[in-house]
Image: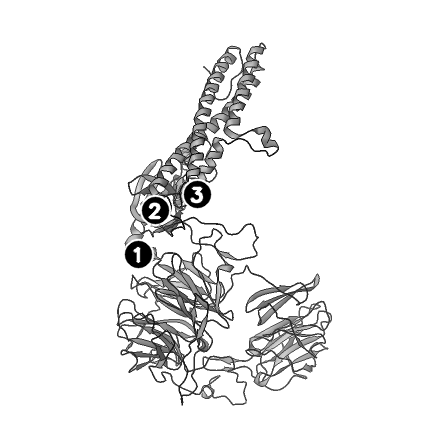
Amino acid sequence: GATDLLIDPRNPDVLYAATWQRHRTVAAYLGGGPGSGLHKSTDGGETWIKLTNGIPKSNLGKIGLAMSPFNPDVIYAAIELDRRKGGLFMSTNRGESWTKQSDAVSGGTGPHYYQELYASPHHEGKLFLMNNYVQISDDHGKTFKTMNEKNKHVDSHAMAFKPSDPNYVLFGTDGGLYESFDLTKSWKYIRNLPITQYFKLAVDDSKPFYKIYGGTQDNGSHGGPSQTMWSDGIANSDWWKTLGADGHQSAIEPGNPNITYGEFQRGALWRIDQTTKETVFIQPQPRAGDPYERFNWDAPILVSPHDPKRLYFASYRVWRSDNRGDDWNPISNDLTLNQDRLTLPMYGKQQSWDNAWDVYAMSDYNTITSLAESPKQEGLLYAGTDDGIIQITEDGGNSWRQFSLNTITGLGDVPFVNDIRADLHDANVVYAAVDNHKYGDYKPYILKSSDKGKTWKIISGDLPDTLLVWRLVQDHVNKNLIFAATEYGIYFTYNGGTNWVQLKSGIPTISFRDITIQRRENDLVGASFGRGFFVLDDITPIRNFNASIMSAEATLFPIKDAYWYKESSRVGSQGDAEYKAPNAPFGARFTYFMADKVQSLKDVRKEREKKNTDFPGWEALEKEINQDGPEILLIIKDGNGNIINTVKGTNKKGFNRVNWRLNYPDKRGERLKAPSGGGFRSRGGVMVTPGTYSATLVKRVDGETTVLQGPQQFNVVPMYDGALPRKSYEEINQFREQVFAFQQDLNATNLMMTNQIQKVGAMKRAANKTTAPNDALLKDINAARLSLLAIQKELSGDPVKDQVGENSAPTPNNGNRVAFSALSNTYGPTGNQMASFNRAKNQLQGIKAKLKSAANTLSSIETRLRQAGAPWIEGQGLID
């Protein structure tokens, strides 16, 4: 295929292309051949000529091209030659002839991994050759020096220039994006792109939030929380690096999240103490007289489901440790085909030693790639290989029997075993994901055996034909529910493999290399290759889904217990330079399925018009316009059956998911004008206390409420105990009810205060419009106005002092804020807060008495105004 393309800016029909002939199988890699070369077209790609003058006649490998921005006649080519050698070539006559400038070639894991070439638009003759450490030439490629990579990830593959700034460069690396504003002297890392490529993952059982671990492409292995207590979500700083290099599989000791395992390429296995962050190298080592220990690039780790201290690890044989990797013993001989990879066919035949072999940065071959042990039968182990074999032992490794996958029609000669999963419910059943893509076959191969691996059948069902499957996970509750991580997203089957459904909401259609279920939380966790980790909170609805649900009007699924705590903010307004993943929504989550949306009259008409468009009639349209649209609601009740809140749900066909933040509704009272966002506004700080609650799913149509399903019970449980013992829940509840009552009283007083001041202003304006001036009336109105302003000062503070920022004496509004703060945590009210609250209550009673008296005075003045012929004032009602 083609590796690079240049377009002459003076004539878009003039093209230069580099081609690359190579062949890579699971076993080996040929990095060059006669199909590699330089080519030119002068007719927009219709025809091409091969450029050979000055180009070596050996097997060329990967070629990178660059055109001089100063003179498009000048072309540069970074060419890979035999055995990882190469050179920088230059043409000054549009590719007609070439001269070798130097022996420069990319190194590191090999030229095939780099070789991209860039010419600076600001400095003639300045070239950048992508490499593990970028090489820079200032003399058209005659000499190169190593670029400053301090504080930057190595392994660069792409770069860009800014036309207006000669000192700016942007580099794309295995570690992300870096920019320099001083021509590579210093670097700024772009930290808000979630683009990590994860190979494998593991989850622990930490409380309250479990942690996720995973190995990445050239970014080491990471660990981090699935959720935090912070309102800003999960930040970069919440993650830590457990190992370096290329990270691969991680593993966790069940019941002890402080002991984890990780590895980098070729089986470099480490035990990691998450308390001290220290690592211990525990890779099994060959014994005296043993051959080289062949490990797969991504060697499998297995913690036994029968003993958390027992580990299994694999090279070309299976190893066992009963003391967390301190000591190892092999429990098998070589379980692979044990071949010499250079004797295997490439391009369909045996290749000469002189051809472009390069296995320098490849995995070893004839290795074990996947391990599983039945949780139902100790010692029943499965080992899958990269050369088409599944090995089975039922006695802990004393004896093994082999199943060759090439005996299954259509699976190819040597399919790669990506994954083996022993069934969680039946010792006889085992699953495997098999891969043939390096031999040109991208079909999904999911296999099942019901006789401990003696015979197998394909259960890929209706999966797309070009859907490579990487990993599997079976639900620990529903044996027929299996999830598959594939090259194009995540799929699941609810009937053991006959039918598969893609999960689409919230996840991109990209490669997912691993998948698992955190069993305590019932969360599905996926490792994507390019977008980080994804979590699907609580798969219970998928687990319980069946045909009868589709026919029911609505189904409310079981509700997971909700943690009781206060989300906190740890940062201020620091911009968007850091990536933050959102937490799972706080509170209780309700999931329900609707066979169809609840239709309004307008919905019914539009549905009918799909068949026949007729005029519905004026009366029907009037009903449609006047209808208060149908609503889906969840009625939340406490353990005593008292309604706590009403949560507005979504009204759509299929799965719906809404959240309740464990809060009471805003009980300050309702104004005539609805607040923005609808009538179910809330102040999220006033939470319920822990206890048993229920949710009932209802629909409300034209004022009539119909129960769809429920109630479903769930618990609100405290997430932690504070450093100090909190107030009793009874004390918190009693104080909350007092505050709610006071807030209504205060809100009504504030509103009446505002209305009375507005009213006295209207009365003054009306008095000026009477048929005969009345000085006594105006004087009484002014006295009433001054009286109201004095009362308002007691209620809200001194307006004169407020103009210059001076503080007023405490008011009921101040006390309300103090009281509300007492309800904004899980500790409960302090004595000081209750004293402030009681002061505010007493103040409010005195203010209310004065305000009632002032209102009576205004009423009598209003009567005199009407008698004096003043015009109507808002609030007086209809005119007799």
Q: Is residue 283 above or below residue 152?
A: below
Whole-Å distance between the Cαs marked 3 and 1? 37 Å
> Disc 3 on helix, strand or loop?
loop
CB under 8 Å between discs 3 and 1: no
Q: Position of residue 522 (x, y in %)?
A: 35, 59
**Cα gap from disc 2 to disc 3, whole angstroms:** 15 Å
Give residue 419's position: percent from left, percent from top: 38, 72
Q: Is residue 269 left or right of residue 190?
A: left
Looking at numbered disc 2 in the image, what kind of residue is underneath it?
A: Pro
| x then y, percent, for residue 582 | 47, 54
In what element is the residue under mark 2? Answer: loop
The residue closer to the viewer here, 343 or 243, is 243
- How crowded pointer 2 is (Cα within 10 Å; few <14, some 14-19, many 20+) is rated as some
Q: Residue at x 38, y 85 (%)?
A: 337
Q: Please, is residue 210 above or below residue 844 in the view?
A: below
Label 2 with label 3: CB-CB less than 8 Å: no
Residue at 50% across, 23% down: 756
Measured from the top left, where is residue 433 in percent x and y? 37, 72
Q: Which residue is mark 2?
A: 690
Residue 631 appears in the picture as rendered: no
From what the image shows, is residue 586 above or below residue 494?
above
**Which residue in the protein does label 3 denote?**
824
* Numbered badge on residue 852: none
Q: Using the image, determine if residue 84 lies above or below residue 218.
A: below
Residue 544, disc: 1
